[in-house]
Amino acid sequence: NTFNARLLDGSARVFAATATAIYELSGGAWVDRSRGGGYATGTGETWNFCQFGDVTIATNYSDEVQASTGSGNFVNLAGSPPKARLCDSANGFVMLFDYNDGVNVFHDGWWCSGLYDHTQWSPSPATQAANGRLFDTPGKISAGRRLGSSFVAYKDNSMFLGQYIGIPIIWSWTQITDNTGAFGHNSVVQNEGSHIFIGNNGIFSYDGSRPVPIGAIEVKLWLKNNINQQYRANVVADIDTKKS
């Protein structure tokens, strides 16, 4: 996986991750920025990255969540967050999805950091770190992406909108649909205040109200007839911004 991290001063860091290491492109060469000892990404697992100010956060479900601030190597993120498959940030929070806290394995779970503090993870009204589950529909969270100041959690055939409401609930999740979802984290992309995503029912746009199908019916039928169901979680979506 690759990730382009934009820092607060406008500079960028470019990362590429393998099963055992995280590299940064520096001076035309790839420099190993892994923590000491490297990583052991599980079979079938992938890295996901998100940015919180100058802190680049990376997670692969197998290893402890990683963080690198501004420059230098990654280290285990402080505060003992759970291992998680997915991450993103919005509204002063880092959000993890599909987590394993060492006791509970909640594939439908979400866990947010403290408000404006990516190192606070113990649930507490004082810090507003919190966790919960989205079990109104079956299945695991396949994608979790920010949408403005909110988050959208996708399952295979459902979607939930998470909105910050403060103490004591912290994040309130509303089910948007129970028949449309996303293949995987990388099948959801940002597009000027909306998401474009690919799922079993075709290609959709979502702006916080309802998912709207886009594209010709021929595209939907082609996807339905040709997608390899075994590897659909690996589908990657992208947008040609010059033509969209």
Image (cartoon, rainbow, N blue to C red):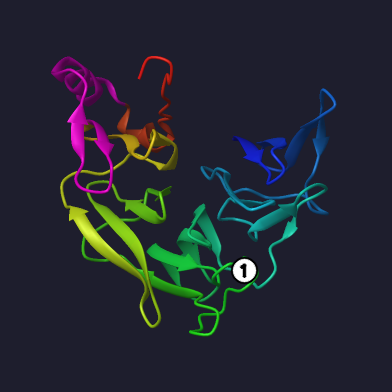
Of residue 130 and residue 181, the one placed in the foreground of this image is 130
Q: Quadrant of the C terminus?
A: top left
Q: Whole-percent x and y of residue 137?
A: 21, 60
- Compared with 43, 135 (above or below) is below
Outermost residue toward the front?
9
Q: Whole-percent x and y of residue 146?
A: 43, 50
The answer to whether 72 appears left or right of 209 in the picture is: right
Q: Residue at x 69, y 36 (%)?
A: 15
Q: Quadrant of the N terminus?
A: top right
Q: Is residue 188 magenta?
A: no
Residue 167 shows in this picture: yes
Q: Which residue is mark 1?
A: 117
Which class describes the residues within 10 Å of circle 1: few (<14), some (14-19), or many (20+)? some
The answer to whether 216 appears left or right of 155 in the picture is: left
Magenta residues?
203-227
Q: Whole-percent x and y of residue 142?
A: 37, 48
Residue 201 shows in this picture: no
- Compared with 215, 166 (above or below) is below
Residue type at tag 1: Asp
Q: Whole-percent x and y of residue 196?
A: 33, 34
- Compared with 163, 33 (above or below) is above
Q: Residue at x 39, y 41 (%)?
A: 184
- Tag 1's secondary structure? loop
The answer to whether 200 appears left or right of 64 in the picture is: left
Which quadrant would residue 22 be assigned to in this image?
Answer: top right
Q: Residue at x 69, y 38 (%)?
A: 10
Q: Is residue 204 magenta?
A: yes
Mark count = 1
Of residue 61 and residue 49, the one placed in the foreground of this image is 49
Q: Residue at x 29, y 25 (%)?
A: 227
Of residue 190 and residue 183, the one placed in the foreground of this image is 190
